[in-house]
Amino acid sequence: MAQTHVNPTRMELTKLKKRLKTAKRGHKLLKDKRDELMKKYLAIAKENMELRIKVEAALIKLNESFTVAAAATSDKIIEESLIYPKLTASLEVSSENIMSVIVPTFKTEINSGNDSSDIFSYGFAFTSGELDSALEYLQRILPDMITLAEKEKAAQLLSAEIERTRRRVNALEYIMIPNLELNIHSITMKLDENERGNLTRLMKVKDMMIKAQIESKQKE
């Protein structure tokens, strides 16, 4: 691991120790955030998978019914039957904060006039019963499709945040903290070496002073 060049002073040592303490605290907080994000992500992913299976099964039935209806009825009649839908839908988009991740939430509202159970905007004389089934499947599955879109977007955003947090945790754990510890160790060793050198010089000076005093007394 490459060591960063630092001045071997006590002031620098104190500053590095403070940075190391802050880095370790940040590392713990980010690990806790990553673990909590993973719990949220796994819960949403499980719900998303269940919804996807349900929606895909309904879409298969819807497609089968519409295919049969298209085979039994002319394209012109189907187009005229569906061109003016009886129901209208509105979508309200808001947001939710999950561990500092802003995810969208969708709320749908079906406007159907007086009778919400009547979804057919055409007469039954010239259309196939399979077309009725296709519309019923679509009506039942639409809320789940909206919820599925919401959950998939939330999972995508959480996944991106987990990856960013993971990179920060790894940068602290494998790069920043080891570098700080290495620099602190290097400065500590250098200061200890300087202290031993100063002590040795002081002892030599003391010995020289004692020797000079002894020689001075002998001359007297």
Image (spheres, rainbow, N blue to C red):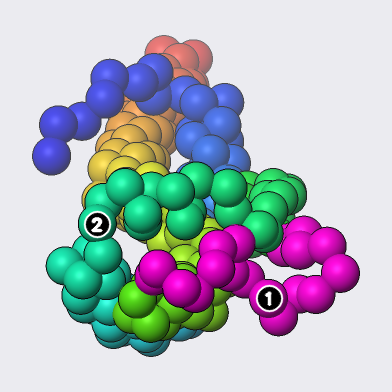
Q: CA distance from mark 1 to mark 2?
A: 23 Å
Residue 182: tell me if it is visible.
no
Quadrant in the rendering for residue 64 = bottom left
Position of residue 14 measured from the top left corner of the image (x, y, whole percent): 57, 36
Q: Amino acid at mark 1?
A: Asp
- Specify the principal SS of the magenta part: loop
Total labels: the figure holds 2
Q: In the figure, 158 relative to 63: above or below?
A: above
Q: Residue furthest left?
A: 1
Horizontal and vertical percent for residue 56?
A: 29, 76
Residue drawn 71% across and 80% down? 117
The residue positioned 46% from the left and 73% from the top of the image is: 125
- What number is the disc on residue 118? 1
In this view, which residue lies farthest toward the right? Answer: 114
- Residue, disc 2: 74
Residue extending furthest toward the front: 125
Q: Is residue 170 visible?
A: yes
Q: Secondary structure at mark 2?
A: loop
Badge 1 marks a residue whose secondary structure is loop
In the rendered image of this protein, does residue 55 appear above or below residue 153? below
Q: Earlier in the sequence, mark 1 or mark 2?
A: 2
- Residue at x-position 66% and y-position 58%: 86
Where the N terminus falls, by quadrant?
A: top left
Inspect the magenta stretch and tell me whether residue 122 lies in it. Answer: yes
Q: Amino acid type of disc 2? A: Ser
Q: Which residues are magenta?
A: 109-127
Q: Nearer the viewer, mark 1 or mark 2?
A: 2
Instruction: Identify the residue at image location x=28%, y=19%.
Output: 5
Q: Is residue 86 left or right of residue 148?
A: right
Label ID, residue 34 = none
